[in-house]
Amino acid sequence: MSIRIIVLEPDDVLHKVAKEVTKVTPNVQKLLDDMADTMYEAEGVGLAAPQVGILKRLIVVDAGDEHGLIKMINPEIVAEEGEQLGPEGCLSIPGLNGDVRRAEKVTVKGLDHEGKAITVTATGLLSRAFQHEIDHLNGVLFTDIAEKVYEVALEQPGPNHQAGE
């Protein structure tokens, strides 16, 4: 398990467009694994490669639903339906949340960690997570598109807190 350092706003890498992955290599697969480990360690729902300082079109998402962990290379939204308005936060912007309008349902296509074509149709939180992470690949942060941004209290570890909880 390798935990990467999460890049924080206002780092320039968060505002750049990530490059397409042209070949699935062991390094790409290792990066996806590291991103998943980093996301879980930070208790996030998704993570994009620019958030660990790498401008490649790679994301990991896990909304805690039946889909489980999804690692995707070159993700692209190919269909959208409906609308939802809800709160979002970001591991790269601790202490802030925002109300963001997103599609209720999206279909996303890309490659899995083996380089095989996959298509996922998502609703609710998973749909929101896909849209949020794909925005990161295009240099867009939730604070750029939120209807309202507000501060939230950062959780402080209690006396019985252990790493990874």
Image (cartoon, rainbow, N blue to C red):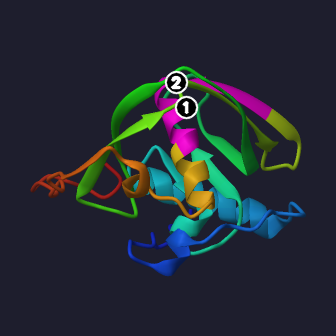
Residue in the foreground of this view, choosing between 155 and 80: 80
Q: Mark number for residue 127?
A: 1
Near mark 1 (Cα within 10 A), the count class, few <14, some 14-19 or many ≥20, is many
At x 78%, y 50%, the residue is 113
Report the magenta stretch's main SS: helix
136 up-or-down from 54: above or below = above
Question: Can the viewer see residue 63 in this picture?
Answer: no
Q: Mark number for residue 40?
A: none
Residue in the foreground of this view, choosing between 107 and 70: 107
At x 38%, y 72%, the residue is 9
Q: Are marks 2 and 1 in contact (CB under 8 Å)?
A: yes
Based on the picture, tell me whether residue 130 belongs to the magenta stretch.
yes
Q: Position of residue 115 (x, y in %)?
A: 87, 49
Q: Position of residue 28 (x, y in %)?
A: 76, 64
Q: Which residues are magenta?
A: 119-131
At x 16%, y 57%, the residue is 157
63 up-or-down from 13: above or below = above
Horizontal side of 25 relative to 85 (left or right) equals right
Question: What is the secondary structure assignment of the residue under circle 2?
Answer: loop
Point out the frontmost of discs 2 and 1: 2
Which is nearer the N-term, disc 2 or disc 1?
Answer: 2
Give the quadrant of residue 154.
bottom left
Q: Which residue is mark 2?
A: 104
Based on the picture, tell me whether residue 156 belongs to the magenta stretch.
no
Horizontal side of 163 relative to 20 (left or right) equals left
Amino acid identity at mark 1? Ser
85 up-or-down from 44: above or below = above
Question: What is the secondary structure assignment of the residue under circle 1?
Answer: helix
Question: Can the viewer see residue 16 in this picture?
Answer: yes
Give the position of the N terminus as an image quadrant. bottom right
Q: Position of residue 122 (x, y in %)?
A: 61, 26
